[in-house]
Image (cartoon, rainbow, N blue to C red):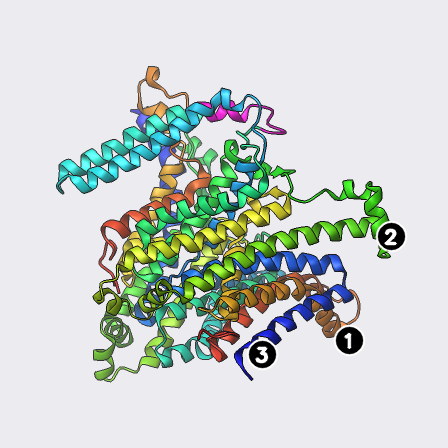
Amino acid sequence: MSDSVRNTMYFAGVALLIIITGFVQSWNTALFILNFGLISAIMALGVNLQWGFAGLFNVGIMGFVALGGLATVLVSMPATPGAWQAGGAPVIGALMLGAATVVAAVILMTKMKAGKLRSFSVLGVLVVGFFVYRGLFDPAVGLIEDIDPAATGYLGGLGLPILLAWPAGGLLAAAVAWLIGKTALGLRSDYLAIATLGISEIIIAVMKNEDWLGRGVKNVVGLPRPAPYEVDLQSNAAFIERANGLGLDAVTASTLWVKLIYAGLFTVVLVILFVMAQRALHSPWGRMMRAIRDNEFAAEAMGKNVTARHLQIFVLGSAVCGIAGAMMTTLDGQLTPGTYQPLRFTFLIWVMVIVGGSGNNLGSVLGGFLIWWLWVMVEPMGSVLMNFVTYGMTDGYWLKDHLLESVAHMRLLTMGLVLLLVLRFSPRGLIPEK
Amino acid sequence: MIDFLNAFVALSNFVLIPAISYGAQLALGALGVTLIYGILRFSNFAHGDTMAFGAMCTILVTWLFQSWGISFGPLPTALLAMPFGILATMGLVLFTDRYVYKFYREQKAKPVILVIVSLGVMFILNGLVRFIIGPNDQRFSDGERFIISVREFKALTGLKEGLAFKTTQGITIVTAVIVVIALFWFLNRTRTGKSMRAYSDNEDLALLSGINPERVVMVTWLIVAALATIAGTLYGLDKSFKPFIFLQLLLPVFAAAIVGGLGSPLGAIAGGFTIAFSEVMITYAWKKVATYVVPESWAPDTLVQLLSTDYKFAVSFVILIIVLLFRPTGLFAGKSV
């Protein structure tokens, strides 16, 4: 069986799984799985860039995804009236001052000779900078957050079309990735892992607590949409007629139609990114990356700048995750920083990449769809299983109740098991790297 | 003078005691990470969830004891249950080692593969803990709540500031001291401990001198299971037991191990306290202490809090980054492979 036949069968299999879900559960569920599957596939592509191409171990994917989500708010929401006048300038000024302080400290650190004088001046710059920053920042933030706190209380965004937020999310994630990469790359692989784990927690903490930026845990709801609203469709005579023509009622038809529009948009992005990743993989640049991955020392001896290349691909991969994050928040229609969980947004993506086949773009896409489908379907499948297991027990028996209640937690168990089994028995994944 | 005493009491109450007990918990966690790193040579991401598993087993046994009416007088029943939790966790880690890690060890897989494998184990343990005990907060502490409470302290000393010393904090500190002494005695004085250190320093040389690697690995896992259970239970007693908290503890625990120097047990302890003290001091509102110390006219009107408590992760992270940049081997010169 040739590779292409096998790959086609894999994808046909996943498509079949989704279609079966459509028949057995509902087409809304099937399209929901498809949409998130598309987004997951993009995230997996991003991680595959870092891990599959370059062997970089990033466990901070959640942070970059969340930054993409933040970008949607910053780009697409209308600016809060009066917020910029109230405290916009001091906040931006304070942030720039904070950045300048850090830059000044770094410059002092590199330019001055090592010694007590250097330590004191660096420390002095940092301490003075911090207090001036807080002095400027805190009152301005207070002013912004006082503006109608129940509805806004944040700066708002630029009021641009939400589709622009997707590349913006990528850029934001790339900028942060550059900062992290500059500090943590070049150290050993475990350190990069722990540094990225930390930075992702910090990004989430910032998004939860800086209310002036994205309303924190009060969430931003009602983001603009690139697709029409279901309610509008349901009152549109032409749409109702077409829906009836297909034998559907207007409500179902409108929800399906909106999901299909999203699916179309996501597919376009996935195809573009996939083609780019494929081209990159087969270009001299991609071969160089794999050479560096397989033997850093040899590549370095050949005159390749390993750290710079690592930084480059780390930024690229994170940008892809940022784009996917922006798309996901667009689909949700709201930014809810409280829902970002590392198990769901970092480690699940890792399972996708490993199961699909690290180093192979097609494999990552497959893994994205397959594992996402599994993630969603474990719960209903688990409850069927548990009903079967507890069939013989009497109702009200504590073990029966407990088992039935705990079905929701079978997801993590299953994912861990899948990851371990694949790593053990098929470490190269479903579609191995050529 | 009284003002300074008051300031010191406030400082002890809000900073020193919490930081010492939190530092002890982190140090115990970091010791486990650092031992795995030294002997098995990978960063074990499942460690947080091993702690959760150990704490969960202890809690279940505690509930059993409580239902039987067994109690430990003024001390929490959990202390009686802890040995059983340790045994269960030992069984678990030996099981995962036998059926998961051993395969990769024999293959001489790259450390990063082992890290990914530990992610899989983390998933399973996390799922298992939630499956068995549920995702919610569990309370299992009983016995006396305070060694000394605010009111008793005020009555005793006549100071304006009160000092509360919770039983759980006292137990944490005492247990941590005992465990650390026992661990160092074991590593430095016993034959097995010495062979562990030899294996950690130079694997090939240790193998040549006839040290059985599987035995070293097994003993390491047993010790790590005990440390993880103790750390998890103490943390659960002191704060509260929530399965997902232990995932978040992973970052400060790793930070402590790296700051101290991965592979160095002494470093793990120093790292634990460094991280704990920085976290507590930077996120504490110093207003209360400051008003006692400075003249009245200088008294601050703000909270004098450097960072809000929500950013405590950021503190451990920043320390971690600074240490990585300027002293990648950590304070106590651990391994830097």
Q: Which residue is mark 1?
A: A392
Of the image marks 1 and 3, the number of the one nearer the N terminus: 3
Name the residue at 52% across, 63% down. B58
Q: Which residues are magenta?
A: A139-152
- Alpha carbons under labels 2 and 1: distance apart: 46 Å
Crowdedness near tag 1: few (<14), some (14–19) or many (≥20) residues, C-alpha within 10 Å: few
* The C terminus of chain A, quarter of image: bottom left
Task: Name, please, the residue furthest toward the top.
Answer: B297
Name the residue at 45% across, 45% down. A171
**Tag 3 and tag 2 share a subunit:** yes
Crowdedness near tag 2: few (<14), some (14–19) or many (≥20) residues, C-alpha within 10 Å: few
The picture quadrant where one finds residue A93 is top left
User: Is residue B175 something one can see in this rendering?
Assistant: no
From the viewer's perspective, is the residue at label 1 or at label 3 nearer?
3
Q: Which residue is mark 2?
A: A244
Residue A105: mark in rendering:
none
**Is B159 in the magenta?**
no
Q: Given the image, on which type of amino acid does mark 3 rest? A: Val
In what element is the residue under mark 3?
A: helix
